[in-house]
Image (cartoon, rainbow, N blue to C red):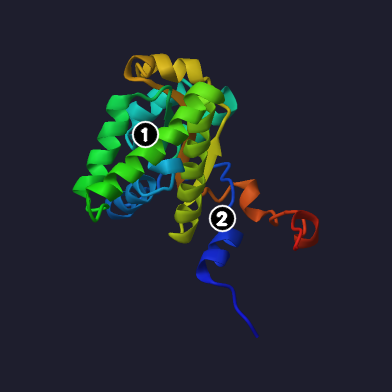
């Protein structure tokens, strides 16, 4: 009899937490691991077009809650930790140079030719989004959502609870944290912690469309 891989078990077990237990806190050691998961998330051409505002203190969570819709505020206030996901609004040569130099520092290139190839390839793809598709903010937002999915699965694998929140007032968060001046905009919020015993959603079975419905094998 076959058994699921642990990551599949985590995918089955995780769910969108509707109520957190404010008395339960994620340990510093565990949250450091989550931060590393966020940092290591994939992004198109390794663009990493994001910034994250993180808080585990009441004052910080209250500031974030100001930018969420009323029904979502308890999910922020009662959570252990909250992450505001922010996307870059633009990209320029200085940022592209910053990326390539970090990759060089991290030993990604066997020689200068490899470095030049990566630099030119990234410039080509970013140029398509800047000059042809003209969709840089949308493209960057897609990368942010890749990151969010990575965090949600990692939290589940670590036995932590989480919920992604799009019920936010992005303009309020932008103003609260001065994001436009820094070249970012708020996209979503993720609350993390441990579920409350009163969370109705924890007791409901997971519901997804069947394999036959969503996959075509060719």
Name the element at disc 1: strand
Q: Position of residue 58 (x, y in %)?
A: 35, 31
Which sits in the foreground, 211 or 55?
A: 211
The residue drawn where x is 53% and y is 36% is: 142
Q: Position of residue 67 (x, y in %)?
A: 48, 21
Residue 151's disc number: none
Q: Position of residue 212 (x, y in %)?
A: 80, 61
Quadrant of the image containing the N terminus: bottom right
The residue drawn where x is 49% and y is 56% is: 156
Q: Residue furthest right?
A: 213
- Residue 154, image quadrant: bottom left
Q: Which residue is mark 1?
A: 52
Can residue 84 be seen in this snapshot? no
Q: Residues within 10 Å of mark 1 (few under 14, many from 20)?
A: some
- Residue 206, image quadrant: bottom right
Name the element at disc 2: loop
Q: Which residue is mark 2?
A: 14
CB contact under 8 Å: marks 2 and 1: no
Sequence order check, earlier mark of 2 and 1: 2
Which sits in the foreground, 121 or 191?
A: 121
Which sits in the foreground, 97 or 201?
A: 97
- Left or right of 51 in this view: 171: right
- Left or right of 215 in this view: 82: left
Q: Residue furthest left?
A: 105
Q: Residues within 10 Å of mark 2 (few under 14, many from 20)?
A: many
Quadrant of the image containing the C terminus: bottom right
Label tally: 2
């Amino acid at each position: 009899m076959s058994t699921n891989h642990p990551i599949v078990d985590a995918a089955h077990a995780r769910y969108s937490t509707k109520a957190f237990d404010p008395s339960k806190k994620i340990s510093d050691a565990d949250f450091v691991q989550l931060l590393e998961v966020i940092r290591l998330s994939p992004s198109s051409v390794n663009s990493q077009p994001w910034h994250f505002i993180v808080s585990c203190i009441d004052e910080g969570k209250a500031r974030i809650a100001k930018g969420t819709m009323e029904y979502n505020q308890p999910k922020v206030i009662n959570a252990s930790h909250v992450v505001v996901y922010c996307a870059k609004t633009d990209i320029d040569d200085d940022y592209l140079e910053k990326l390539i130099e970090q990759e060089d520092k991290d030993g990604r290139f066997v020689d200068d030719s490899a470095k030049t190839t990566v630099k030119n390839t990234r410039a080509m793809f970013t140029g398509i989004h800047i000059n042809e598709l003209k969709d840089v903010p949308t493209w960057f937002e897609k990368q942010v959502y890749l990151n969010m999915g990575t965090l949600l699965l990692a939290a589940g694998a670590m036995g932590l609870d989480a919920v992604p929140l799009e019920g936010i007032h992005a303009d309020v968060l932008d103003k609260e944290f001065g994001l436009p001046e820094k070249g970012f905009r708020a996209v979503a919020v993720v609350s993390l912690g441990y579920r409350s015993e009163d969370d109705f959603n924890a007791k409901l079975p997971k519901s997804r469309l069947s394999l036959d419905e969503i996959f075509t094998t060719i």
